[in-house]
Amino acid sequence: MNLESLVGGGAEVVGPEATLREVAQSMVKTGVGSVGVVDGHALVGILTERDILRGVADDVDIDGSLAADFMTPAPDTFAPDVDVEEAASWLIETGYRHLPVMRDGELLGIASIRDLLWAMVEGTD
């Protein structure tokens, strides 16, 4: 099984000028744990629920703090044809929990470690 089979629905994205509150509201509304941060059509970063939580724990103004200030810039990405097990191994090695999947500069979706592990378990049935 490859990554493309996990990210067919597209990715939730925000602009770098979105506030942390706007990002958090978007995540809650769509039920995702991370969003791609895009400038135009280019992926410039990834912002996760943990990034927002760090900001809240540091008592930042979530209405005045921007996605660009809390995102992981220029995240590593994988192609959609990469095997799920290979991607899961990479996430475990790096400590990351979310992996942007891209084809020809287009963000297809973001696979989480949970998505990958679930696919691996389901694939063994």
Image: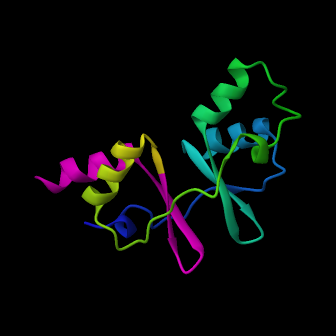
Image quadrant in which the N terminus is located = bottom left
Q: With respect to residue 72, does 12 lie above or below?
A: below
Residue 58, x across and y down, in percent: 73, 20
Q: Residue furthest right?
A: 64
121 falls in the magenta region: yes
Q: Residue furthest left?
A: 125
In this rendering, position of residue 110 left or right of residue 45: left
Residue 80: in sight, yes or no? Answer: yes
Task: Give whichever of 119, 45 is nearer the camera.
Answer: 45
Quadrant assignment, res 28 = top right
51 falls in the magenta region: no
Q: Residue at x 34, y 57 (%)?
A: 87
Q: Residue at x 84, y 50 (%)?
A: 17
Q: Residue furthest bottom?
A: 104
Residue 85, x across and y down, in percent: 25, 56
Residue 3, x across and y down, in percent: 36, 65
Residue 10, x across and y down, in percent: 54, 65
In this rendering, position of residue 40 left or right of residue 78: right
Quadrant assignment, res 93 = top left
- Colouring style: rainbow
Task: Give whichever of 39, 93 is nearer the camera.
Answer: 93
Residue 31: in sight, yes or no? Answer: no
Q: How many numbered discs sit on the rendered protein?
A: 0
Magenta part of the chain: 99-125
Q: With respect to residue 26, does 106 lie above or below?
A: below
Q: With respect to residue 33, does 61 lie above or below?
A: above
In this rendering, position of residue 7 left or right of residue 21: left
Quadrant assignment, res 54 = top right
